[in-house]
């Protein structure tokens, strides 16, 4: 099977023989709601291609298509020591990355800090203080007693940001359930730097990076066929390399049209106007109850943050339907709590190896206090497959759209994130959808979505290195203060 791409998911036989008619009818209804057939995938992809182009125009569209000022791929020979801060959604991670002389190599040390739930809905000051504290701790721990010059830092801030410069970023809006007051519409760099300065932490921010751009660059560092970087995790998004001549909204800057520019698509916002995506009543509830209704329509059908919630909403709805007998006489208190199930809950159900779904039965019992019958378990299992398959198939539309837009017929796509790495069959289902969209018949898939290198760590370091390098070479477009950047580049080595 080598070279044939991900294998088809094995299908559990699962007998529907004993499933009563009301549940069978519901399984059928859910199948209709959640299945995205080939023709629909193609229609979504075609609309996606147009929306990608629209996002690059002066008028813009739903998809932000943010120019990132990451201008080119690495050649594998980038060197230096960099810090990287990753504020992705679930955790905060600080890394120190050393890029040695050897091509495509790196060493990394890292510490993870939990992102307190309260912080996600707190205020800006608390956020920057927490972030700066983590960086300070990291430096004190790993460089105790050392005299340090300013360390260059790549800050992976994985939210939509308008960047006039690489070391600047105005948060367009929070995504992934974040709702921190006083950050939207503002440049995130000055308050971040101020918090560091207050603590005397010796850091120079060289690049503000999106996780997708980091993923693209980190993956291309070791594999030159990588043309797209994707995240399928708490959120869902992609980045690719455009040429400046194809970005009408940058035309006023008179950049050389051949210069490359990584675009952070922010494709989670695809179809916010609800023209093509086959939304179910459950997707509509998710949107309505979220902190930013009307935003991230695509992401809310795909990303890890929402998969468990879609599943939960379906089950609660079925239970409330007088025509359906499900979880009769059971206390649904736990199941009724919003966002109480995450994507890993669904993963475990899909992975249940037993014909009688005994692991799923235990999960429902232990986590939710619900005793399930065999027919209910069949419905539950079926539902997770439907939700997981829809997510993978819709994701493939975005990848296919970028390839179509750029006339890419063969490449590697670097992907990272909990859903991509951990959700069962996500890769195989995505690959199958790509085949259907792009009508491949060859034995080997010409476009493959593969596990990426660490974008938020190594990618951010590489983007810092590339920025310092181009600054030294006199290519200072999109660098706020080239003098200060050059001074940082000169001081770069950590004094031992
Ligand atoms: C959300 C963010 C985006 C990020 C993605 C994956 O879509 O808006 O910036 O890349 O999640 O983390």
Image: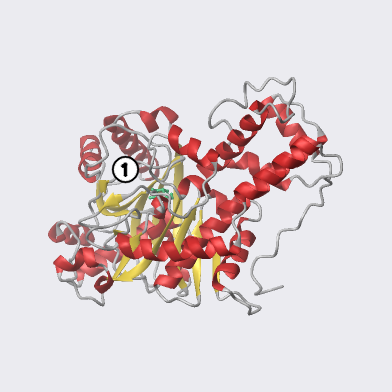
In the rendered image, the vertical position of residue 316 relative to residue 244, given as above or below: above
> In this view, which residue lies farthest toward the bottom?
442
Q: Is residue 165 visible?
A: yes
Q: Is residue 105 visible?
A: no
> In this view, which residue lies farthest toward the right?
17
Disc 1: residue Cβ within 8 A of ligand 1's nearest atom: no
What count of labels does the image hold? 1
Quarter of the rendering occupied by the N terminus:
bottom right
Relative to 400, 59 lies left or right: left
Viewer-closest of 362 and 119:
362
**Colour scheme in the image?**
secondary structure
Q: What percent of the width, then of the height, locates residue 245?
A: 25, 73
In the rendered image, the vertical position of residue 398 relative to residue 15, given as above or below: below
Relative to 118, 186 lies left or right: left
Q: Residue at x 39, y 73 (%)?
A: 406
Q: Residue at x 75, y 23 (%)?
A: 328
Label 1 neighbourhood size at 10 Å, few (<14), some (14-19), many (20+)? some
Determine the image quadrant of residue 356: top right
Relative to 173, 373 lies left or right: right
Task: Write down the residue under mark 1.
Answer: 173
Q: What percent of the width, then of the height, locates residue 310?
A: 57, 39
Q: Residue at x 37, y 72 (%)?
A: 77
Q: What percent of the width, then of the height, locates residue 144?
A: 35, 42
Q: Residue at x 54, y 38 (%)?
A: 282
Q: What percent of the width, then of the height, locates residue 375?
A: 80, 37
Determine the image quadrant of residue 355: top right
Viewer-closest of 46 and 253:
46
Secondary structure state at the residue bearing disc 1: loop
Relative to 220, 387 lies left or right: right
In the rendered image, the vertical position of residue 405 relative to residue 142, given as above or below: below
In the rendered image, the vertical position of residue 408 relative to residue 134, given as above or below: below
């Amino acid at each position: 099977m080598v070279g044939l791409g991900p294998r088809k998911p094995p299908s559990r036989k699962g007998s529907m023989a004993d499933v009563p008619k009301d549940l069978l009818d519901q399984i059928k209804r859910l199948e209709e709601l959640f299945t995205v057939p080939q023709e629909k995938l193609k229609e979504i992809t075609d609309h996606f291609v147009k929306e990608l182009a629209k996002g690059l125009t002066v008028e813009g569209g739903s998809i932000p298509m943010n120019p990132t000022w990451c201008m080119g791929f690495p050649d594998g020979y980038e060197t230096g020591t960099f810090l990287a801060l990753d504020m992705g959604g679930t955790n905060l991670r600080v890394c120190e990355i050393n890029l040695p002389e050897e091509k495509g190599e790196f060493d990394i040390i890292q510490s993870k800090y939990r992102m307190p739930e309260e912080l996600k809905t707190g205020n800006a000051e608390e956020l920057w203080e927490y972030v700066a504290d983590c960086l300070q701790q990291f430096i004190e721990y790993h460089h105790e007693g050392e005299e340090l010059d300013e360390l260059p830092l790549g800050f992976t801030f994985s939210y939509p940001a308008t960047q006039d410069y690489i070391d600047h970023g105005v948060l367009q809006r929070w995504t992934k359930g974040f709702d921190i007051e006083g950050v939207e519409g503002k440049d995130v760099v000055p308050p971040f730097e101020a918090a560091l300065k207050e603590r005397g932490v010796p850091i120079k921010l060289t690049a503000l990076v999106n996780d997708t751009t980091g993923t693209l660059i980190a993956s291309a560092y070791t594999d030159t066929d990588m043309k797209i970087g994707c995240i399928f995790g708490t959120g869902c998004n992609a980045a690719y390399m455009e040429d400046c001549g194809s970005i009408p909204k940058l035309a006023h800057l008179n950049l050389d049209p051949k210069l490359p520019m990584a675009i952070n698509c922010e494709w989670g916002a695809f179809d916010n106007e609800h023209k093509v995506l086959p939304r179910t009543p459950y997707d509509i509830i998710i949107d309505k109850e979220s902190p930013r209704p009307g935003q991230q329509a695509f992401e809310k059908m795909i990303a890890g943050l929402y998969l468990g919630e879609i599943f939960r909403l379906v089950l609660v709805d079925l239970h409330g339907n007088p025509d359906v007998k499900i979880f009769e006489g059971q206390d649904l208190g736990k199941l009724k709590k919003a966002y109480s199930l995450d994507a890993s809950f669904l993963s475990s159900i899909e992975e249940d190896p037993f014909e009688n779904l005994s692991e799923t039965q235990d999960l429902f019992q232990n986590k939710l206090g619900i005793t399930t019958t065999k027919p209910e378990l069949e419905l539950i299992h079926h539902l997770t497959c439907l939700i997981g398959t829809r997510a993978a198939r819709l994701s493939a539309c975005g990848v296919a759209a970028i390839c179509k837009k750029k006339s890419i017929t063969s490449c590697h796509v670097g992907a990272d994130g909990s859903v991509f790495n951990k959700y069962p069959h996500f890769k195989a289902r995505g690959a199958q959808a790509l085949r259907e969209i792009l009508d491949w018949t060859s034995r080997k898939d010409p476009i493959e979505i593969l596990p990426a290198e660490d974008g938020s760590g190594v990618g951010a370091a590489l983007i810092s290195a590339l920025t310092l390098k181009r600054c030294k070479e006199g290519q200072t477009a999109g660098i706020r203060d080239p003098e200060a950047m050059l001074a940082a580049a000169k001081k770069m080595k950590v004094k031992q």
